[in-house]
Each structure stands twice: as structure tokens, then as C-alpha cells.
Image (tube, rainbow, N blue to C red):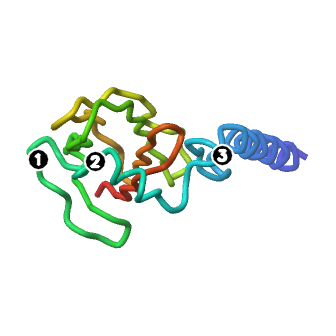
Amino acid sequence: MLTLKLKLLVMIILLGLLLSACSLGSFGPPETCGDNIGGSADTAKYDQYFTNMALVNQNGESGMEGENGMEFASTDSLDLRADSNSDIAVRACIQDFNGRPIPFDETRTFTQGSSGISLGSFQSGSYVVRVIVEDTLVKNFPFSIK
């Protein structure tokens, strides 16, 4: 009889853990940067505002090309750097494809010339930086942290 009670207790605990995990979103789709943000970037709008844009580490180096975009080390702190034609508000939203919440979503003003946003460092996994101008996706930077 004790064995049956122990089995029932273990099943209840496992069910509770499963429900907790589902409510935290670990089994759901990744969070998005908005309903209309994703997919292909608007290259005409990008060209209107930028001459160059890159995702780099703290030393200004691009990551190695990997299976899921550029690869960086977990010790790297990432920056989004750009040369812009005019002052423009730039939203950088990073989607985490590992089921975790969006780790970065900020809007900064890029001034004419060279500007940037410090994005910070990330846990191992796959991500994409969505670069958004005037509610329009202008650039995607897929990357992974090893």
C-alpha cells in the first residue's frame, strides 16, 4: 500500500513540474518582436537610412559564419554598429529561439555617421537581432552563442 501512495505522490510531483514548465513557456514558441516583425527585411528602407550595419563583438570583430548565422563565444559582449545617412530611431529586438523570453528590446537614436547599441552577452543558443525602423524590419542578424 505504501508503494502505491509513493507512486501517486511521484506522479503528482511530476505533473506539477510539467504544468509549471508549460506555464513558463519553455514548451511554447519563441516570443516575437511584434506581429509584423519577422521574415524578410525591407532592403529599400534599409538603403534609405544606412550605408553599413554589422553585428560585432566588443573588439569590433564579426563572428565566424556558422550553421545559424554568425557564431560568438559566451564571453563576447555584442554590439550593433551602423553608419547612417541621418538621425534615426532604431529598435533592436533580439528573439531567443531557445524558448526563453526576449533578452533585449530597446530603441536608440542613431546619429548621422557612426553609431551603435551595446547588446550585452548571451547564454548559449540561437538568436536573431531584428533591426526595426519606423515599425518596419530593415535587417536580420541571426547568430548563435557557443
Amino acid type of the residue that numbered disc 1 sits on in the rendered structure: Gly
> In the drawing, does residue 60 fall left or right of residue 14?
left
Q: Work out whether residue 64 or residue 16 is closer to the camera in this orientation and state it.
A: 64
Q: Position of residue 135 (x, y in %)?
A: 54, 39
Q: Is residue 38 above or below residue 79?
A: below
Crowdedness of circle 3 by 10 Å Cα count: few (<14), some, many (20+)?
A: few
Q: Work out whether residue 137 or residue 84 is closer to the camera in this orientation and state it.
A: 84
**Residue displayed at 8% across by 45% down:** 59
Q: Secondary structure at mark 1?
A: loop
- Of callouts 1 and 3, the N-terminal one: 3
Q: Quadrant of the rendered structure where residue 21 is?
A: top right
- The residue tagged 3 is 35
Can you tell which of label 1 and label 2 is closer to the viewer? 2
- The residue tagged 1 is 60
- The residue tagged 2 is 50
Q: Position of residue 101 (x, y in %)?
A: 54, 39
